[in-house]
Image (spheres, rainbow, N blue to C red):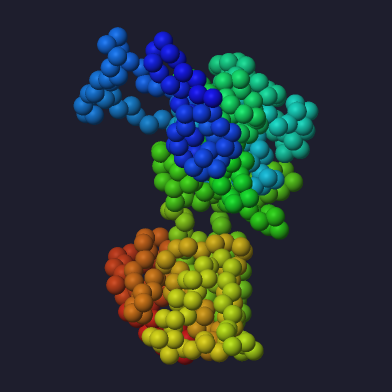
Amino acid sequence: MAKTAKSAGKTMRYRCSECGCVSLTMVGRCPDCGGWGTMAEDIPLKEDRTGRLAAASAKPISSADVLPEERVPSGVGELDRVLGGGWVKGGVVLLGGEPGVGKSTLLLQVCDAMSNAGKRALYISGEESAGQLALRAKRIGVSGGNIDMMCGNDLMSMLDASAGYEFIVVDSVQAFKLDEGLGWAGSPGQVRTAASCSAEVAKRGGVPMVMVGHITKQGQIAGPKILEHMVDVVLFFSGERTSAHRLLRAEKNRFGSTDELGIFEMGERGLVPVTDPSHLYWSVNGAAVPGVAVGISLEGSRPLAAEIQALSCATPYPYPKRTSRGIETSRLQLLLAVLERRCGIFSRGSDVYANVAGGFFLDDPAADLSICAALASSLKDVPVSPDTCFIGEIGLAGEVRAAARTHLRIREASRLGFKNAVISAREKLYDVPDGIEITKVFVLSQMLEKVIR
């Protein structure tokens, strides 16, 4: 039933933390979005003595004091790359990922690195006991003497005791039960309250904080969507169970770019940063095989070589198959249509399979030219020279468009030992490294005539 404050003439309202739906009665399930445990009391704005809403005073944006950005290195180069240079004092980071991908392992290693740099780190765990956490730290070789841990479910008391630390980890935000929040541990109300209290401690003390978040089977961070709005940075840690490599990306970053990619390799002693990722996605095979081409992709400011593999064979079905891994199937179909319409290379009678070696997902538009080269090579059964790489975007008219930061890609191709790079004729290069030849083409058919005869 609705609670009415008769003396003040006000009626209690309840608002959904997911969609903002307002109800006059307290219900367990939101009538609009259907979320369970998302309805919470809607606190009205403060009023002055006359009954009017209190107004805030505004000031010019130019009058605000702008402090120089100060970064705190995490001690892990790949993590600093994704963050934009390190932690920001008072910044709150949300780290999500599949169970067992290595989130806690990464954060323990970060605590160890910061401890070795003279920083005091606090690890708050709501899922593991002190013995389990210490056993994990011992297994991966964490030896920092400035790392303290607190284990339990009383988050407020642990946050109250966090004064004096220079780095705090909360693992995980869905594991705590607070008296101030509604529902059980992990419910939207509890997750929102735990995140709000943790962020307030970080902001007030100027301490960088990382909150670990569970994800749902759809791949999204569990809890209300407002959780991602409350933090400054949202990181996703991913990796295939059959592979030792882990990828770290930023979905949101108030202090830097979201284009950077961090790559780690999981070993017996924890996560090891991969400083030269090109060799992960390129087999460096000297033999020329039909259907194999190498493109120079760009992940943020980091160029890396990606090996595209294509296989075509006669289909026994009336509708040929189009299967891809690491490339969107719609993108594969589009490029096959351009090859057929603009270059006369037909694939309607063949099943076509495409793959990016190493399990890498390729979404860089400049990889179009390398994908087309691999597809044409497979359909014509003519190999591409292993000393050739491809950089360029393909339009529906068959034109080869210029790529972003081509000079960085050419430099990486030269470092890896490629002798020829096929790029758009619309590119303007002023500094070409020694030992690599540049082949410029205007349209896709010119590339096929020069490279795939």
- Quick check: can you spot residue 232? no
**Residue 417: x %, y % from top left:** 51, 69
**Residue 369: x %, y % from top left:** 44, 74
**Residue 93: x %, y % from top left:** 51, 35
Query: Foreground: 47 or 273?
Result: 47
Kindly identify the residue that appears in the image at 55 percent across and 72 percent down: 308
Kindly identify the residue that appears in the image at 50 percent across and 20 percent down: 3
Query: Foreground: 210 or 450?
Result: 210
Kindly identify the residue that appears in the image at 54 percent across and 25 percent down: 1
In the picture, residue 66 is in which quadrant?
Answer: top left
Task: Classify 393 as above or below 77.
Answer: below
Horizontal side of 53 relative to 322 (left or right) equals left
Kindly identify the residue that appears in the image at 62 percent across and 64 percent down: 358
**Residue 65: x %, y % from top left:** 28, 24
- Quick check: can you spot residue 401? yes
How many numbered markers are drawn?
0
Horizontal side of 131 relative to 414 (left or right) equals right
